[in-house]
Amino acid sequence: DGGITQSPKYLFRKEGQNVTLSCEQNLNHDAMYWYRQDPGQGLRLIYYSQIVNDFQKGDIAEGYSVSREKKESFPLTVTSAQKNPTAFYLCASSQPGLATPTGELFFGEGSRLTVL
Amino acid sequence: EDKVVQSPLSLVVHEGDTVTLNCSYEVTNFRSLLWYKQEKKAPTFLFMLTSSGIEKKSGRLSSILDKKELFSILNITATQTGDSAIYLCAGTASKLTFGTGTRLQVTL
């Protein structure tokens, strides 16, 4: 079945450690996104990529980094520079079209990161 | 900066009630508005609205967009406990901007 796979589902880390969250899609979508979700704040865009080897900062990119070396993969690294990394992270992909530049987003199941 | 505001933030209703969820947006170069339902983890797609005044329906759910007033509503009739979720709306331009969501709880 086509879809988006995020791993790990739950992750605990000590303060000051970098962590990398995996996101893989087999939908053949060009665009991929990373969102952060905190209680009462909805989804906030961290980074997005519309094509392989290219990505743009979203609204809250500080303390995060990404890469897009393959169409199906868009890993997110939460660095020690991120001041409040404990959150629920959602990866999504879409196939942009002419009428809808972003297209409908398909989401993964999310990764919950807790920094101790 | 693009902004999407949803109201109410949370809502508790009895099974069988009808609810209306609101979404207002200020999105530069707006192209469409999307509604999602998030029950536990992954949001699932409900509607994409691009044209003003045309209602989209799916079972007991319906939604409409007003591009003049920069507003959309999501209606759920004859609510069921399975409708309990967070409902998210997002305005799209070159990227999506999400609102904070409305948490709906349907009780027996």
Image (cartoon, coloured by chain):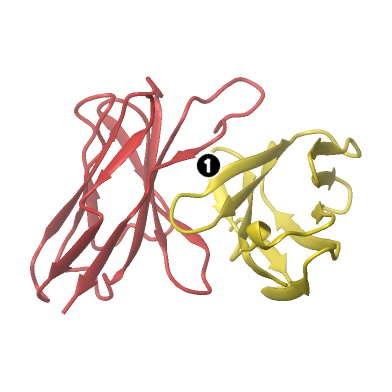
**Chain letter of the residue beneath label 1 in the structure image:** B
Q: Position of residue A69 (x, y in %)?
A: 19, 28
Q: Residue at x 30, y 39 (%)?
A: A5
Q: Quadrant of residue B63?
A: top right
Q: Secondary structure at mark 1?
A: loop
Read off the residue under disc 1: B95
Q: Position of residue A8 (x, y in %)?
A: 20, 52
| Count of numbered labels shown in the rendering | 1
For the question of whether residue B30 can be seen, the reply is no
Q: Which quadrant of the figure contains the N terminus of chain A?
A: top left
Looking at the rendered structure, the kind of residue marked 1 is Lys
- Chain letter for the part of the structure drawn in yellow: B
Q: Position of residue A76 (x, y in %)?
A: 23, 49
Q: Which quadrant of the figure contains the C terminus of chain A?
A: bottom left
Q: Position of residue A14 (x, y in %)?
A: 9, 74
Decide which of A107, A59 is in the foreground and name it: A107
Q: Residue at x 73, y 59 (%)?
A: B80
- Chain letter for the part of the structure drawn in red: A
Is B68 placed left or right of A25 in the picture? Answer: right
Q: Residue at x 77, y 73 (%)?
A: B13
